[in-house]
Amino acid sequence: MIVVNYVAAGCVFCIGLFAVVARRDVIKIVMGLSLMEASTYLLLVSMAYRRGATAPLLSNPPSGQTQRDVVHGTVSDPVLQNFCLTAIVIGIAVTAVFLTLAVRVAQHYRSVDAADATALRG
Amino acid sequence: MFWVLDYLCLLAIVVTAALTVLQRNLAASVLALSAVGVVLTASFVVLAAPDVALAEIVVGTVAMPMLYFIALGKLRTVIRDNADLGEERDRDE
Amino acid sequence: MTNDDGLSRGFRQEPHVQAGWHRPWLGGPLVLAVGALILVGVLALPRENAALPVIARHAMEIAVPVWGQAEVVSEIVYGSRGFDTFGETFLLLGAVAVVLTLSRPREPRSEYVGEASEGRAEQRRLDPDEPESGDERKARQAESGEESETRRIRMSVVVRVAVRTAVPLLAVASVYTAAWGYTPGGGFPAGAAAAGVVLLVYAALGHRAVRHVVRSAVVEPIELAGATVIVALGVAGIVIHGSMFANVLPLAQPLTILAGGNAQLYSGAELVEVATGLIIAIFSLLGMGRDWTIHDDDSQQVPAPQDEDQ
């Protein structure tokens, strides 16, 4: 049943890829990249989920359980959540750099159309 | 109950992602991207990942739209903007 | 070149206003092929009835005894996998350096070409007492960007009062997120929220309210100080215990503010670094000028006259 999550993450990835491939505005291309990164966050957190799991927090165990029960019981995977946090930070860094590049390119060619940046055309 | 919430969040994510790509108006698509972040956060809470949800809400509503809107503003003074929001600038700042 | 609408000649319309998709017949099948590949791959991923991996179970078991941490994800981020967090924080630092370099303003022509010094020498020769004319003053101000609109605007009094009320709460909330080890959060969301606080003050109260904070002489050393603390923690772990980011601070009782050993110092340093890094990136993007002026027009370049010496 969590397969639906994975398939939805794949759909969002394909939507982002389509934006990169089929749109000419440089800002839309950067947005497509952001969408692809968002799809990987969803995929990682969905992979971390276990059936009937609780959050991997030991501070306030759910009613009827002690800390020990939580440690040995069903929790969602904290290691994959760590990867997702790293991915979010990387996403914001890449977006900042890519946007600055896009603005510089658009300023130089005086147009937001990616098809106008023809300096390297052989 | 969990699956109902989960599938609703997934539907919202896919719909807002499609909106981001299909919108012509750049400011509207930036806001749709921010909405993707918000719905992603709701989905993370449902999927028992509070730490990731906190990071995603902060990034998706503070840092990401800020960067995009600044980039849009820098481009609007370079390119003559005719039809999107009805603004028209004949001279730069 | 001298028509009054000279700007519009060199510019194009934003393409998405008229054109829609760009070769969708080429992009569509490609995306569908990638989507099919992803579908095949995703169906083979482990589902929700898989057992928890050994690393995850181990991390949960050592969280309270070894690290004194009640929040397992924070223990992994700042403890067991502190090296990954070090990598991601320094990647953000590198990205901020790239944004700062790319949005560097145009070098003032006086320093680069020597025109201003020549001009000064000539002015001294001709008439040392000539005052600055209005045009010259306006040109200097335009170049330095002091009087531009984006630096001066404040918002209405309702917004200003609301921001003055909300900013202390938001600042305390962001420090809280980083200070307590056993609540979800940590340094990165706290840093981004603190950068958001500075941006809120800038947007509502104008540039004058933040000009003492948002100067490169202030924020850059602070950012690198945060980075240095993180490196020092890692090296201290190597020196004292033999592995990077091993715990070097005394453990406190779990569920207290000092719990987690390294975690609180690490996450405080990450707050400082991420907040100042994002402030640098955003304000250098905001101050990004063009790399050309109104009168540069490439299409009108006259080829240089050839010297014929022979």
Image (cartoon, rainbow, N blue to C red):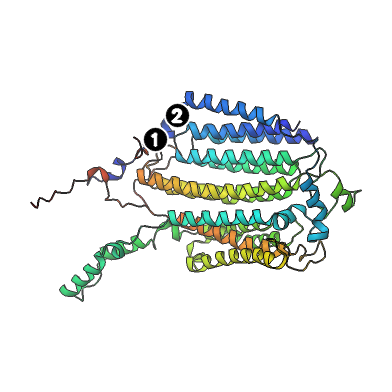
Element class at badge 2: loop
Q: Nearer the viewer, residue C182 or C64?
A: C64
Image position, residue B44 (x, y; %)? 71, 43
Q: Which residue is mark 2?
A: C22
Q: Nearer the viewer, residue A21 or A28?
A: A21
The relative height of residue A51 versus residue C230 in the rendered view (above or below) is above
Image position, residue C277 (x, y; %)? 55, 59
Host chain of mark 1: A
Element class at badge 1: helix
Residue C305 in view (yes/no):
yes
- Measuring 67% from the left and 39% from the top, which residue is drawn there? A42
Image position, residue C196 (x, y; %)? 58, 56
Q: CB atoms at circles 1 and 2 under 8 Å apart? A: yes
In the picture as drawn, the residue positioned furthest to the right comes out as A64
Host chain of mark 2: C
In the picture as drawn, the residue positioned furthest to the front comes out as C242
Instruction: Indicate the quadrant where residue C105 lies.
Output: bottom left
> Would residue A12 be found to the left or right of residue C15 on screen?
right
The relative height of residue A108 versus residue C70 in the rendered view (above or below) is above
Residue C165 in view (yes/no):
no
User: How many residues crowd around disc 2 within 10 Å: few (fewer than 14), some, or many (20 or more)?
Assistant: some
Label 1, label 2: how many angstroms apart (C-alpha)?
10 Å
> Would residue B7 be found to the left or right of residue C282 on screen?
right
